[in-house]
């Protein structure tokens, strides 16, 4: 396992983080605990959950696992999130001080910990001024309930605004952002990643395998079937990846990953995850697994480093399609400036 600083903080985490979105959903409690044990054995030190995963059950499963293994909590960095609805009322969702106060206390209770190491706004809230949210986070840090602040699913302007407001108001800084990022979805490279590189924010990619597409389990002209996330809802899978990115490019990426996996004698999941771990500003990649066997496969990425040539082949096959302006050639040329010779 490799380790890295969490954004620009002095805290260190494993470059693979265990996501817990399947816990209490596709994965039962025993299976979830087996994944947590396996992850820690492999040297993993970073867990990601959210209040909304299985409506609190994911956090409860993690909490019972922590209670059953005295001492394990001390070596872990635990992240959770608040923002999505946890009830039907108008104040059971959002980034308001009112909702987050309740949401944070409920997460602390379910996890059974004194403090959450990384507390994240799960998405932007158009109804709450971000100043209110940032002040809430800062108060929670001062109260000892959270240690670091992160956000998730923010677009570029939202992230930059939050980062600068926190800095100039002297509030706890945003240290990480958690966006969707994988070889089939590189949209964050236009706006979010440059903010992160410039501001020293750590990226925590979610759905690193595109929900399973990048493991090679889905094949051309062959709709997913059986007990898989996409198999249970085949149209969602095809629309989210093959449809959205143009089917041909999706297969081009899958073929490029397969060729490298075969030549290195490793799995396609390992290649896809290793590409992500070494992208600019990435701190730690959030793994998702339904079974311990899948987790084992994904953990083989822990020590895999791709060559420059392998990275270039993956970069090329997965290159986001953009018009010349403002993200393509014309936009880049417009911003160029050189010193006089
Ligand atoms: N902040 C957010 O809004 C947000 C959103 C989504 C996720 N997340 C976080 O990111 C984590 C990971 O997301 P994700 O679950 O979508 O990740 P993912 O790696 O893209 O997809 C995981 C799914 O792919 C399949 N899979 C994984 N490894 C496999 C392998 N080695 N071989 C074959 N199939 C494999 C499994 O589904 P099947 O076996 O069922 O096909 C598994 O549940 C979550 O647990 C959560 O912590 C955050």
Image: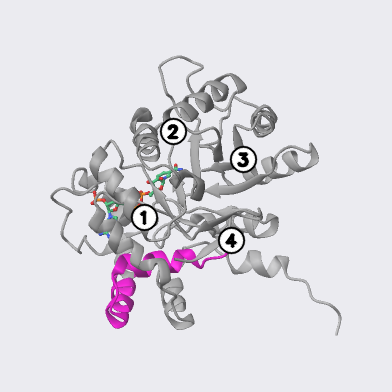
Q: What secondary structure characterizes most of the magenta part?
A: helix
What is the quadrant of residue 132 in the picture? top right
Marks 4 and 1 sit apart, C-alpha to C-alpha, by: 23 Å
Residue highlighted by disc 2: 111
Badge 3 or badge 2: first in the primary sequence: 2
Whole-percent x, y for residue 149 in the image:
61, 41
Q: Residue at x 44, y 36 (%)?
A: 50
- Res 249 seen here: no
Residue highlighted by disc 4: 281
| Residue 185 vs residue 151, the one in the foreground | 151
Specify whether residue 296 is painted magenta.
no
Badge 4 marks a residue whose secondary structure is loop
Marks 3 and 4 sit apart, C-alpha to C-alpha, by: 21 Å
Badge 1 or badge 3: first in the primary sequence: 1
Q: Quadrant of the C terminus?
A: bottom right
Badge 4 or badge 1: first in the primary sequence: 1
Badge 3 marks a residue whose secondary structure is strand
Badge 1 or badge 2: first in the primary sequence: 1
The residue stretch that appears in magenta = 253-281
């Amino acid at each position: 396992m490799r380790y890295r600083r969490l954004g620009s903080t002095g805290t260190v985490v494993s470059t693979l983080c265990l996501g817990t979105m399947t816990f209490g959903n596709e994965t039962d409690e025993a299976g979830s605990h087996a994944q947590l044990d396996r992850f820690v054995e492999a040297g993993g030190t970073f867990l990601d959950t959210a209040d909304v995963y299985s409506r609190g059950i994911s956090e409860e499963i993690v909490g019972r696992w922590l209670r059953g293994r005295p001492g394990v909590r001390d070596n872990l960095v635990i992240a959770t999130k608040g923002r999505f609805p946890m009830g039907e009322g108008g104040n059971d969702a959002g980034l308001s001080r009112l909702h987050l106060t309740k949401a944070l206390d409920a997460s602390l209770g379910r996890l059974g910990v004194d403090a959450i190491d990384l507390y994240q706004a799960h998405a932007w809230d158009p109804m709450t001024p971000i100043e209110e949210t940032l002040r809430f986070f800062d108060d929670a840090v001062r109260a000892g309930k959270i240690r670091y602040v992160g956000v998730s699913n923010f677009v570029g302007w939202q992230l930059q605004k939050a980062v600068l407001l926190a800095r100039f108001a002297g509030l706890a800084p945003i240290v990480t952002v958690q966006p969707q990022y994988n070889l089939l979805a590189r949209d964050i490279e236009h706006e979010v990643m440059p903010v992160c590189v410039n501001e020293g924010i750590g990226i925590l990619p979610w759905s690193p395998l595109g929900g399973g597409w990048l493991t090679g389990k889905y094949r051309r002209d062959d709709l997913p079937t059986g007990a898989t996330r996409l198999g249970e809802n085949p149209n969602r899978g095809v629309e989210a990846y093959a449809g959205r990115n143009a089917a041909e490019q999706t297969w081009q990426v899958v073929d490029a990953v397969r060729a490298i996996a075969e030549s290195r004698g490793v799995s396609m999941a390992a290649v896809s995850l290793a590409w992500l771990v070494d992208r600019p500003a990435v701190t730690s990649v959030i793994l998702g697994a339904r079974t311990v066997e899948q987790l084992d496969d994904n953990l083989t990425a822990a020590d895999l480093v791709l060559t420059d040539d392998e990275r270039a082949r993956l970069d090329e096959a997965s290159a986001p399609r953009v018009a010349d302006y403002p993200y393509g050639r014309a936009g880049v040329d417009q911003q160029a400036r050189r010193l006089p010779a």
